[in-house]
Amino acid sequence: MMAQTLFEKALALLNLREADGTCDQTLTKNALPCINAVYCDLYYLLYDSGYRDVSSLRDTLNLPERVFFDVAPYGVAMHLAKMIGDGLNQQIFSTIYNSKRAAVGAKDNICDTFIKGESI
């Protein structure tokens, strides 16, 4: 899954696309720091080592599909909103991203447990 796809999803969430499908070139030029901030955050929730920043929008992100499509776009939208000075959207997407992010590292383990009682 490419960084470009993640960037486009974040732009759609913020409604920052023009009618012809383009966006402000300033956003495109500053997309990588926003993507890398979220990518690094989510990567280390899942893996212990091996992280590398993306250097191009054509680079592939090593994230599970659900995290890539359901969590990461909200984080990138949060950073883009902050970058353009949109405080309201920054707060909204920060709240959404952080609640979705909390579920990424959570692993549900079900164990059988026997309580050892005292002998009478």
Image: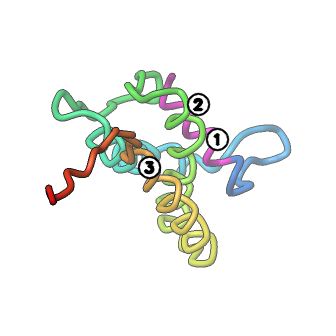
Amino acid type assigned to the residue bearing label 1 in the image: Lys
What residue occupies the far bottom of the structure in this picture? 87
Residue at 65% in and 48% down: 11
What residue occupies the far right of the structure in this picture? 19
Frontmost residue, 117 versus 76:
117
- In the image, residue 12 above or below residue 66: below
- In the image, residue 118 above or below residue 11: below
Mark 3 crowd level (few <14, some 14–19, many ≥20, 10 Å Cα): few
At which x and y percent is residue 23?
A: 67, 46
Frontmost residue, 6 versus 63:
63
Disc 1 versus disc 3: distance between alpha carbons? 15 Å
Asked which secondary structure carries label 1, the reply is: helix
Q: Mark 1 vs mark 3: which is more N-terminal?
A: 1
At which x and y percent is residue 49?
A: 16, 31
The main secondary structure of the magenta stretch is: helix
In this figure, which residue is indicated by the disc labeled 2?
Answer: 5
Amino acid type assigned to the residue bearing label 2 in the image: Thr
Do callouts 2 and 1 mark residues in contact (Cβ within 8 Å)? yes
At which x and y percent is residue 31?
A: 46, 45
Q: Which mark is residue 30?
A: 3
Q: Which residues are magenta?
A: 1-11
Q: Mark 3 vs mark 2: which is more N-terminal?
A: 2
Disc 2 versus disc 1: distance between alpha carbons? 6 Å
Mark 1 crowd level (few <14, some 14–19, many ≥20, 10 Å Cα): some
In this figure, which residue is indicated by the disc labeled 1?
Answer: 9
User: In what quadrant of the picture does the C terminus appear?
Assistant: bottom left
